Image (cartoon, rainbow, N blue to C red):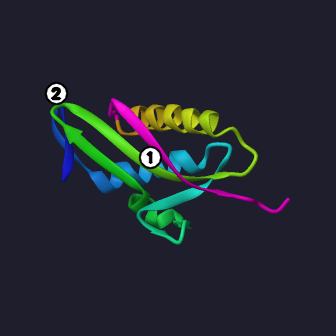
Amino acid sequence: MSIELKTKFGQIDISNDVIATVAGGAAVDCYGIVGMASKKQLKDGIAEMLRRENFAKGVIVRQENDEVHIDMFIIVSYGTKISEVAHNVQSKVKYTLDKTVGLAVDSVNIFVQGVRVTNP
């Protein structure tokens, strides 16, 4: 599935995997994020952290009518305020997708899959 954008020069089709990778890259740049978690895998209460090339596995891109919705599965750092981290991720993902892809996102839903204690 892909997102279709119409311009005065023609039509642009952007794959959901591309949008998911851009959104995941924007999310991990935010303070308080340890990494992305897989949307399907949660074994024994422990979420698997994804590498940069697999960010699309931790992001779901949905298109309903003319609205685009993104669901993100993240792992946050211990000691950070989870609500602030989630809000920062939402803002940065919306801004990054608007500036890099030209896509207006209607909602960014954050699912915190785990909290990791990092060594100083």
Name the image quarter holding residue 105. top left
Numbered mark located on residue 8 in the image: 2
**Residue 73 among those drawn in magenta:** no
- Residue at position x 26%, y 44% from top? 62
Q: In front: mark 1 or mark 2? A: 1
Disc 1 crowd rating (10 Å Cα; few below 14, some 14-19, many 20+) is many
Taking 9 as reference, is 116 left or right? Answer: right
Q: Is residue 105 above or below residue 80?
A: above
Name the image quarter holding residue 94. top left
Pick whichever, 120 or 2, lies toward us: 120
Q: State the SS at label 2.
A: loop
Q: Quadrant of the C terminus?
A: bottom right
| Residue 37 locus on image (x, y percent) | 50, 60
Numbered mark located on residue 23 in the image: 1
The residue lying furthest to the front in this view is: 44
Disc 1 to disc 2, C-alpha distance: 26 Å
| Residue 68 locus on image (x, y percent) | 28, 36
Taking 80 as reference, is 39 left or right? Answer: left
- Residue at position x 68%, y 46% from top? 32
| Residue 76 locus on image (x, y percent) | 63, 51
Q: Earlier in the sequence, mark 1 or mark 2?
A: 2
Exactly how many numbered labels are in the figure? 2
Disc 2 crowd rating (10 Å Cα; few below 14, some 14-19, many 20+) is few
Query: Which stretch did the figure color magenta?
Result: 102-120
Pick whichever, 56 or 76, lies toward us: 76
